[in-house]
Image (cartoon, rainbow, N blue to C red):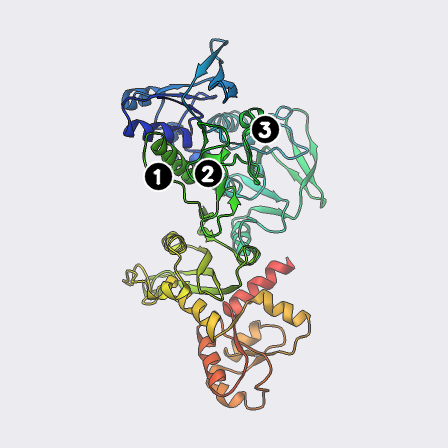
Amino acid sequence: MKIVVIGSVAAGTSVAAKARRNDETAEIVVYEEAEDISYSVCGMPYFLGGEVDELDTLIPRDAEWFKKRFEIDIHTNHHVKAIHPLAKEIEVYDKVKGEGTRETYDKLVLATGSYSLTPPPFTLDTYENVFHVKTMDNTKAIDTYMKSNEVEHATIIGSGYIGLEMAEQLTKKGLKVSIVELADQIFPRIDADMAYHLEKELQNNNVDLHINDKVKTIKGEGKVEAVGTENGAAIETDLVILAVGVRPNTVLATEAEIELGETGAIKVDNYMKTSAEDVYAVGDVAESFHRVTGQSIYHPLGSTANKMGRIVGDHLTGGPLEFKGTLGTGIFRLFDLTVAFTGFSEKEAAAAGFDPVVIHNIKPAHAKYVGGQEITIKGVADRKSGRFLGAQIIGPEGVDKRIDVFATAITFEATAEDLFHLDLAYAPPYSTTKDPVMYTGMVLENARKNLPVVTPEELVRLQDKDVPLQIIDVRSPKQYEKNHVKNAVNIPMPDLRKGVADLDHSVKTVVYCNKGVTSNTAQNLLLNIGFLDANVLSGGNTNYQNYIKSQNR
């Protein structure tokens, strides 16, 4: 059997290596357009920022290594011009020799990856200081440019993973950094109330933000000297990084009339088979599906690409592995914060047909008396079944541990109550007696049953509609005077039993403290003395004030 793979970054080399581990008799050939293979795309910002000293660290293996280790022939600087599924042939052009050939295959794997978008008015060929951060060639070009030119100010277009990682790294390198983001928030992948924490962190590190804006004009001949935005900002710059997203590189598939999915990536089944016989697709070029709903999604990440590659390499050599979808799990660092998410947001859960209940949980990652710092968790569960559906977490520590627990829980269809019953490790330097994961499950389960929660967004919406409400702030008068929820009355917790005597027990009541713990006690008290609709404000006044600021910036 002859296996031919087109592409050799994450998915392609994973296909080849797994196939060889399973089968010593197969002929395995890989074609790569560029010079470098099997490199870390995700590590590029950290080299450009100086956190990674040597570029070769991101390119741990070359074609010779694969030949010696696996007896796999990887041909770099080879451009595959066309594929012919009916004839089981591909057309290959050797860029070094300037020669073209035809190659046959028994099984063909497309690992052609994705390409970065270039938003107008930018063009890569016109300006020497405009770059993507997608390939090793991009990284080398940026490094060379920064070493050869005086670069003091960088402008980043877009605030996704790469945009924010580059903002962090270039700031740490000593550059002045500006971000221009088309959406009305930083990092649109997460909810606006959570993204506000990222906005504050960027501002605290002197990153210049232009949100809900886009570049309209460019000043400079051959080199961008300044950009003008639609909202009237003029940004002088020495370097421009385009980070507005990627699209699957489906040129070969489209020309061969291989079916694409609704996301625009190649449509595949659970074994990554395409609509063409004996042709597979893996990595950024392939469509994925959501683990919970089975709906098609596009999730271009290195971890997903490696997994897809391993599955195809196994399947081609008689193994049982099959792809089981993704949750869209992601994580990145932004200065002193870690940002992570998995599963559905509230809006995504509703769109998928669930009745979502949402809570905010602000808790220390480990015991405060040994330096524990607070993390903010936004959790989502289905109101009817209790199934846990998603989480977003932001904080300075302990975020990675919790998001992986949440992703595991969703994968195995855990309920909110199951989260509370997890037997998680505890010691003061690592957790709290009631870990934030367990507390999230407890509050979600309470909220969907008999202890309802109102999010800041929902509370503002009710107030805008003039729905009759009683809002009680159970903090101290000093805290209340500093800031409080609109129209709230201050009845400190020690005075609550007597203080609510004149309130209407039948009117919807919302009670809150600073972060949500004391207000839960207050809610139970109100329900026990006859209040019919007592609610806790999710995340307390802290979460409410952040939400209001995120809406009014």
- Looking at the rendered image, the disc whose residue lies closer to the viewer, 2 or 3, is 2
Residue position for label 3: 129
The answer to which quarter of the image holds residue 272 is top left
Image marks 2 and 1: residues in contact by CB distance under 8 Å? no
The quadrant where residue 318 appears: top left
Q: Residues within 10 Å of mark 1 (few under 14, many from 20)?
A: some
Asked whether residue 438 appears in the rendered view, the answer is no
Q: Nearer the viewer, residue 28 or 202?
A: 28
The residue nearer to you, when weighing 192 against 451, is 451
State the image coordinates of residue 458 (x, y, percent, origin top left). 59, 67
Q: CA distance from mark 1 to mark 3?
A: 45 Å
**In the image, what residue type sits under mark 3?**
Asn
Judging depth in this view, the residue of 275 and 263 nearest the camera is 275
Tell me the element at label 3.
loop
Q: Which mark is residue 335?
A: none
Q: Is residue 330 left or right of residue 188?
A: left
Q: Is residue 510 above or below residue 199?
A: below
Relative height, residue 58 to residue 232 (above, below): above
The quadrant of the picture occupied by the C terminus is bottom right
- Nearer to the camera, 163 or 203: 163
Q: Position of residue 114 (x, y in %)?
A: 52, 32
Mark 2 and 3 residues: CB-CB less than 8 Å, in contact? no
> Which mark, by number, is residue 321?
1
The residue lying at 55 percent from left, 52 percent from top is 199
Q: Is residue 464 left or right of residue 524?
A: right
Tell me the residue that label 2 is attached to.
269
Residue drawn at (42%, 19%) of the image: 105
Q: How many marks?
A: 3
CA separation in Å, label 2 and label 3: 41 Å
For the N terminus, the quadrant is: top left
Identify which amino acid the numbered label 1 is placed on. Leu
Q: Amino acid at mark 2?
A: Asp
